[in-house]
Image (spheres, coloured by chain):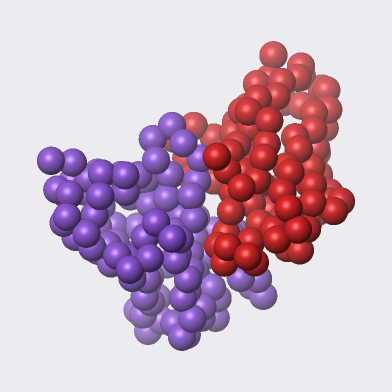
Amino acid sequence: QSVLTQPPSASGTPGQRVTISCSGSNSNVGSSSVCWYQQLPGTAPKLLINKNDLRPSGVPDRFSGSKSGTSASLAIGGLRSEDEADYYCAAWDGSLSKLVFGGGTKLTVL
Amino acid sequence: EVQLVESGGGLVQPGGSLRLSCAASGFTLSGDWMHWVRQAPGKGPMWVSRINSDGSSTGYADSVNGRFTISRDNAKNTLHLQMNSLRVEDTAVYYCAHAVDGSRNDLDIWGQGTMVTVSS
């Protein structure tokens, strides 16, 4: 059971906008910044969003992040087939003194 | 090219030891926090350990505390993870990861991973 809760799956058609949620608690999402990672099959995770809503250089602006209280969200607009991947949220948990990840959301582009 | 390259993985029996290394190229590790993250087959990432820029502060997941030791050699631009008393449940791909400048936990550069298999 992951400390951060994500839906196990999400889907959309090309061009659509999809949102993936990440629910935590006051000790992690509520008090730390959230990152989002994209993992394509057989590859290492890639940083998509850090500090809740910042896009590292090279990440398309179709990807956006937000946070409110103990929940965070990743939105992907203009869905493309290459967005099909696993997505993970992560945050530092001050009570557990560890970096915690969500269980992951598998995004399918129909 | 900015990259991290792990090495040292392999097959080991329960109770055995391995030392993983992570070499950085195209940038210097010395000013930044570094992490180890592992991923068991078919599972999501799990944080293992982190170390600050000069090695004076470290942290570990409960499941590895007392068995694993993270260290760094800034002169050689490398990160290490000494793994002792290995268990079957330690089987995973182990990634080293660099934290964004000025951040402790936002992981912007990841290695390709090295597989550790603990089995008799």
Is residue B1 among the parts visible in the rendering? no
- B110 displayed left or right of B85: right
Residue name at image x 79 percent, y 33 percent: A19
Residue A24: x %, y % from top left: 72, 49
Residue A89: x %, y % from top left: 66, 46
Residue name at image x 23 percent, y 63 percent: B84
- B4 displayed left or right of B101: left
Q: Quadrant of the C terminus of chain B?
A: top left
- Residue toward you, B107 or A55: B107
Residue A11: x %, y % from top left: 71, 20
The image quadrant that residue A74 belongs to is top right
Q: Is residue A78 above or below residue A34?
A: above
Residue name at image x 58 percent, y 53 percent: A100
Q: Name the colour assigned to chain B in the rendering.
A: purple
- Residue toward you, A62 or B1: A62
The image quadrant that residue B78 belongs to is bottom left
Q: Is residue A11 above or below residue A74?
A: above
Residue at the right extreme of this rendering: A68
- A61 displayed left or right of A104: right
